[in-house]
Amino acid sequence: MDIISDFEKLKLTSTEVASTHDADFCFVDFFKKGSAGRVIFEDHVVPYLPLEDLLAAATTCRQVNAMCRAYTVGEVLAKHSINTSRFHKMELGKFILASVSTQYTPDSNIHRRFIRTETESFWARLYHPSQLPELELAMCVYLNIHGIQFEMKLDDDFDWDANRDESTPVLISATFGDEDAGTVDVTVILRYLLMKQGNTELILEPPINGPRYWYNCLFGDPCECVTKRLWITTRTADGSVQRHVFPEDRTVKMKLRAERMDADTTTDE
């Protein structure tokens, strides 16, 4: 994609604006959907702008608003067509506050959007667009823990070939709990953790100042007051299947990757 000439046109001096060469150039069109300018701005400029600057820029025009769009928890749920009760939305909001990074949302500078529906009006906290992967991961964790049915397919937006290494085992399934007292399937949680971590290595480590039983915060507690384990089933390039077992709250660091959902296969043990 040749963008050099377009960038040259962005030199908006009075002489150049008046020239015939630049008279037909539209600054807004440079950032239209699918353009090189929009891709560069969204991928390389937006992540470095604080939320306050994005919100100010979003008021300039519709095109810039689309590139600088901030999100509330409810808007991300709606983006994935997930419907749940107000109680779970409130609890999910608390869970997200405790789990996402504060890089773009320092406590000293909170931004909110006024939401008005047919039944209620309220202020909702805004999150930086660069935090979307974290928000979606936290939602997957929360919804999975509470047994809420959802379909949050991020496969189409993820570059599965970027770090594809056939020597890295593939995630088949994961289970947490006790085989006698009760277990829960946590495959979707590990899957999105891998996507967030670059899809080359699974890292599970206790959060800073987190609780003692931090696996419960990540996976839920399928059997209270019972010592649990985490089982991870993987497949290697030669087709062999292995089952790895980790004691509760054990730090994990292992080579692992997930495949596109329609390529995943489930193996019965």
Image (tube, grey):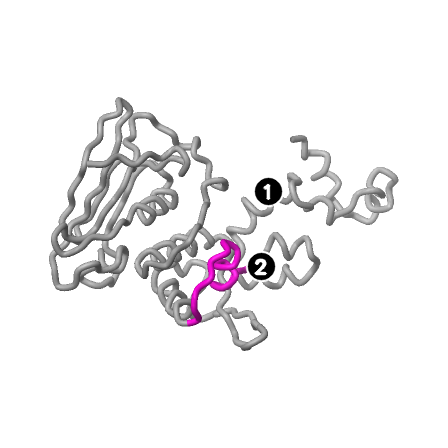
Q: Which quarter of the picture shows residue 240?
A: top left
Label disc, if present, on residue 54 of the rendered structure: 2
Q: Residue 106's spot in the image, x, y percent?
A: 43, 65
- SS label for mark 2: helix
Distance, label 1 to label 2, CA atoms, is: 15 Å
Q: Residue 5's spot in the image, x, y percent?
A: 72, 34
- Which residue in the structure is indicated by mark 1? 40
Q: Specify the segment rendered in magenta.
A: 69-86
Q: Residue at x 82, y 41 (%)?
A: 22
Q: Residue at x 13, y 56 (%)?
A: 181
Quadrant holding the N terminus: top right
* Nearest to N terminus: mark 1 or mark 2: 1
- Give the vertical position of 208 relative to 231 (above or below): below
Q: Amino acid at mark 2?
A: Leu
Q: Residue 157's spot in the image, x, y percent?
A: 50, 42
Which one is nearer the viewer's eye here, 67 or 137?
137
33 within the magenta span: no
Q: Residue at x 37, y 59 (%)?
A: 148
